[in-house]
């Protein structure tokens, strides 16, 4: 009887191992050592999703491989819940060999041998699904709202101009200026939509690019277009990132936004790029002295807020930046600049 039970247990273990190895979600079996998850086994889907070979990651601290430095506190909080025997269920961003990706994470603890706490981490890649849903929602909301509003402005002021053509010149000049402004906004919107279409049809393709000359080209162009503005740079001689030339879309949109939305006659913009100290990431920063981007607009773009009929962002510029950055496995964040305005930052994998 004992022999039969042992055989049955061995068969069950074999079937279980076969299941784990062939499911499509990435699975890590770990042991908590000093509160940190240490990898004991990964399945083939983990190798495919994260890009790390089994031999490299087994018996290594999991967080050292897949959690970027700025997300360590979140990961540690999840590990503490696992250590206490709680099941975790949360959307997370984790680092792969291709950059950041979004996963649905499930942490499932169980009592291991002796006094150890072991568990499984299951990662379902949501990146493509989430981005596609959000892109469709944004394009629908922004284009529907902004195109309708700008068309209404053009129509209303054209009607007013015709009705009051013989009235005082100052009024006609103001109406004409509003029509011109609305037409320019429409032109910008359609240009951004075209650039977004290019980005969404692109692939990261594994190329590397020196971002310094790219940034200098963007800055030189905007200095010519905005002669009264102060557009300064703080750049190394060279800084190679895992991206292609489409990175220019993001940098150009950030500098354009910083200048366009600043009511000052002499706006100031400071563009910086620097490698991280040790974590393998590069940061490109565009700081300005203009009005800060509203919190609800930031939240919608970063994913911390829901898109609604009234909350979808004021245009497509920041969405172009976000999706271009995500194409290369990077991240868009916001802070307050030392100039008193916005500090918009792109984190990109270094080469």
Image: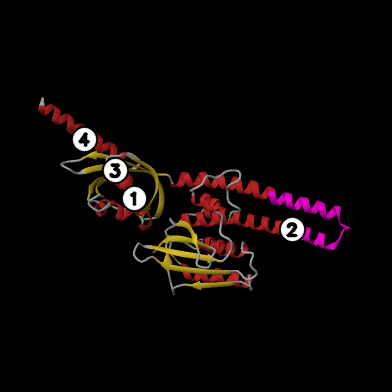
Q: Nearer the viewer, residue 243 or 110?
A: 110
Residue 174 colored magenta?
yes
Residue 302 colored magenta?
no
Q: Is residue 296 above or below residue 223?
A: above
Mark 3 = which residue? Answer: 82
Query: Element at badge 3?
Result: helix
**Comes first in the chain, label 4 or label 3:** 4
Q: Residues within 10 Å of mark 2 (few under 14, many from 20)?
A: some
**Comes first in the chain, label 4 or label 1:** 4
Q: CA distance from mark 2 to mark 4?
A: 73 Å
- Observer-side mark, 2 or 4, equals 2
Q: CA distance from mark 2 to mark 1?
A: 51 Å
Q: The N terminus appears in which quarter of the rendering?
A: top left
**Comes first in the chain, label 3 or label 1:** 1
Mark 2 = which residue? Answer: 178
Mark 1 = which residue? Answer: 75
Bounds of the magenta span?
149-176
Give the left or right position of residue 303, taking residue 73 as reference.
right
Residue drawn at the location 47% of the way across and 57% of the way down: 333
Q: Residue furthest right?
A: 166
């Amino acid at each position: 009887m004992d022999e039969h039970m042992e055989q049955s247990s061995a068969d069950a273990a074999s079937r279980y191992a076969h299941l784990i190895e062939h499911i499509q979600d990435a699975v890590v079996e770990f042991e908590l050592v000093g509160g940190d998850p240490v990898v004991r086994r990964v399945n083939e889907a983990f190798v495919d999703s994260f890009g790390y070979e089994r031999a490299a990651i087994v018996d290594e601290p999991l967080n050292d491989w897949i959690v970027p430095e700025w997300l360590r506190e979140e990961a540690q909080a999840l590990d503490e819940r696992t250590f206490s025997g709680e099941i975790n269920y949360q959307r997370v961003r984790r680092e792969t060999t291709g950059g950041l990706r979004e996963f649905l994470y499930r942490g499932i603890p169980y009592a291991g041998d002796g006094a150890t706490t072991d568990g499984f981490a299951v990662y379902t890649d949501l990146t493509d699904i989430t981005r596609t849903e959000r892109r469709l929602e944004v394009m629908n909301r922004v284009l529907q709202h902004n195109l309708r509003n700008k068309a209404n402005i053009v129509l209303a002021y054209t009607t007013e101009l015709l009705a009051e053509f013989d009235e005082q010149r100052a009024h006609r000049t103001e109406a004409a200026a509003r029509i011109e402004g609305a037409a320019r906004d429409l032109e910008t919107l359609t240009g951004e939509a075209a650039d977004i279409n290019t980005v969404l049809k692109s692939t990261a393709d594994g190329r590397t690019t020196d971002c310094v000359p790219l940034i200098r080209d963007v800055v030189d162009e905007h200095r010519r277009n905005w002669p009264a503005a102060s557009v300064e740079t703080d750049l190394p001689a060279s800084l190679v990132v895992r991206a292609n030339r489409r990175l220019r879309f993001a940098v150009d949109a950030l500098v354009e936004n910083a200048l366009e939305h600043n009511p000052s006659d002499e706006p100031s913009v400071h563009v910086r790029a620097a490698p991280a100290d040790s974590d393998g990431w590069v940061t490109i920063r565009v700081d300005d002295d203009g009005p800060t981007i509203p919190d609800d607009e930031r939240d919608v773009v970063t994913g911390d807020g829901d898109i609604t009929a009234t909350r979808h962002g004021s245009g497509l510029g920041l969405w172009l930046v976000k999706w271009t950055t995500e194409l290369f496995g990077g991240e868009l964040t916001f802070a307050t600049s030392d100039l008193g305005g916005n500090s918009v930052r792109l984190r990109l994998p270094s080469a």
